[in-house]
Amino acid sequence: MDILLIGGLWLDASAWDDVVPELEALGHHAVPIALPGQGDGSTSATLDDQVAAVLAAIDGASGKPLVVGHSAACTLAWLAADARPDQVAGVVLIGGFPWDDGKLYADLFEITDGVMQFPGWEPFEGPDSADFSDALKEAFSARAVPVPEGVARAVVQLTDERRFDLPVTVVCPEFTPAQAQQWIDAGDVPELARAKHLDLVDLDSGHWPMFTRPAELARVLASSAK
């Protein structure tokens, strides 16, 4: 199966370099998606541009692909599923949840000169980065790509309720499946509260398992590729 891999904020497609061979060894075709504005030098890209890149990958896939989003890009994966509900096999969300209609995509940190820079490690102290060495933190910071304002502050627009029929797997790295279920039950994740086929899977890692647990992450993704 084609497995489309969408990195979260500040990541380019190379974030999946250690996951791709693991997925290939498990018999799947891994496709890291290069997002406009995250690695191509553009600061004018919009969320619509990024959605279009994911949709192009879906349209070019062999059969129905599994769409995987990480962190903020859980919403991006969900937007793509909303636009192509009949053309995807399912959605996997790693370390995050999809925003509902009308929310801002990722208005999380200060915008300076039209981009949202990686804010450093202070906001991610604790479980998010507990499995990162100092060297890995330095490497991450050096390769972090500023996110264009047109992506971060775009309004999420969802239109097709057939998205709720799709199988959804939430990979729970820095939080537990029990915590995720609690947030869903409390009404904090209305999109997933309406999902008809939802699995919550534990993964013992921090927020970026593609760097620290690539083999384990690949196995979780492969198990969702049915």
Image: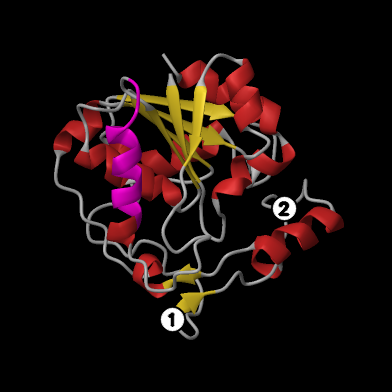
Residue 223 in the image, given as x and y percentages of width and height: 52, 17
Residue 95 in the image, given as x and y percentages of width and height: 54, 43
Q: Which residue is mark 1?
A: 114
Circle 1 — which element?
loop
CA–CA distance in space, label 1 to label 2? 27 Å
Mark 2: amino acid: Ser
- Residue at coordinates 35% horizontally, 55% vertically from top-left? 50
- Residue at coordinates 23% horizontally, 54% vertically from top-left? 101
Q: Which residue is mark 2?
A: 129
Residue 33 in the image, given as x and y percentages of width and height: 46, 44
Question: Quick check: 13 above or below 39?
Answer: above
Looking at the rendering, the stretch of residues picked out in magenta corresponds to 50-62
**Main secondary structure type of the part rendered in magenta:** helix
In the image: residue 168, left or right of residue 141 = left
Camera-side residue: 111 or 6?
Answer: 6
Number of residues whose C-alpha sits closer than 10 Å to that of mark 1, classed few (under 14), some (14–19) or many (20 or more): some
Number of residues whose C-alpha sits closer than 10 Å to that of mark 2, classed few (under 14), some (14–19) or many (20 or more): many
Camera-side residue: 206 or 116?
Answer: 116
